Image (spheres, rainbow, N blue to C red):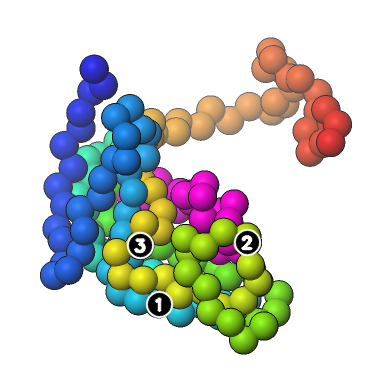
Amino acid sequence: MRKEIEVFIELSEGAVMPTYANEGDAGMDVYALEDIIITPMDTKIIPTGIKVAVPDGYEIQVRPRSGISYKTPLRISNSPGTVDAKYRGDVGVIITNTSVYNPREEYLIDEKGNKQGTYKIRKGDRIAQIVLQEVPKIKFNKIDNIKDIEGDRNGGFGSTGI
């Protein structure tokens, strides 16, 4: 059985409590609080209607739902987003519609085919997932040459191929 960490949550009127879709899932689905239209190349903050008090030493990460990323041109712009332990404001999900043109049609996020155009997110749609992560505090130790530290694999940014 997994350890449970208590996180206090406040729900706005009409908001849906985040839920696990399946036993053992890492992420909880979060839901749109209202209908939002996102036109091509537009970015919107989708309100969830939740406020949380994350314990010190933790963060909540806001991540994409794989189905939306696969089936639509909608992307969470700052993925993963972070809800810090001391933040008590509204949790919103920043979504960009990466469609490059608008064929004057409107689609819903549960349609298949990764269609280009305007998307309507409906109140109650599952728009992202949240994951509680432990966040240790960094203590930097300044040195003169980082190569003196054992473990350098000598590579980066494509060094292992594409």
Residue at disc 2, secondary structure: loop
Question: Residue 123's x, y, as percent?
Answer: 31, 70
Give above or below for 5 relative to 88: above
Q: In the image, residue 157 lies at what x, y percent? A: 79, 38
Residue neighbourhood size for the residue with mark 1, other residues' Cα within 10 Å, grouped as few (<14), some (14–19), many (≥20): some
Q: Quadrant of residue 20?
A: top left
In which image quadrant can residue 58 be found? top left
Specify the label residue 125 is tagged with: 3
Residue 8 in sight here: yes
Does residue 162 appear to the left or right of 55 in the view shown?
right
Amino acid carrying label 1: it is Ile
User: Nearer the N terminus, badge 1 or badge 3?
Assistant: 1
Q: Which residue is mark 1?
A: 36
Which three-letter amino acid code belongs to the residue tagged 2? Asn
The x, y position of residue 152, in whole percent, is 73, 19
- Mark with earlier residue (1, 2): 1
Q: Residue at x 37, y 34 (%)?
A: 26
With respect to residue 137, does 107 lie above or below?
below
Give the Cα separation between the discs numbered 1 and 3.
Answer: 11 Å
**Circle 2 crowding by C-alpha within 10 Å: few under 14, some 14–19, many from 20:** some
Q: Is residue 40 magenta?
A: no
Residue 122 x, y percent position in the rendering: 36, 71
Q: Which residue is mark 2?
A: 114
Residue 103 lies left or right of residue 76; in this view the side is right
- The magenta-colored residue range is 60-84
- Left or right: where 49 falls relative to 30: left
At mark 3, the secondary structure is: loop
Residue most extreme to the top = 150
Q: Secondary structure at mark 1?
A: strand
- 2 or 3: tag closer to the N-terminus: 2
* C-alpha span from label 2 to label 3: 17 Å
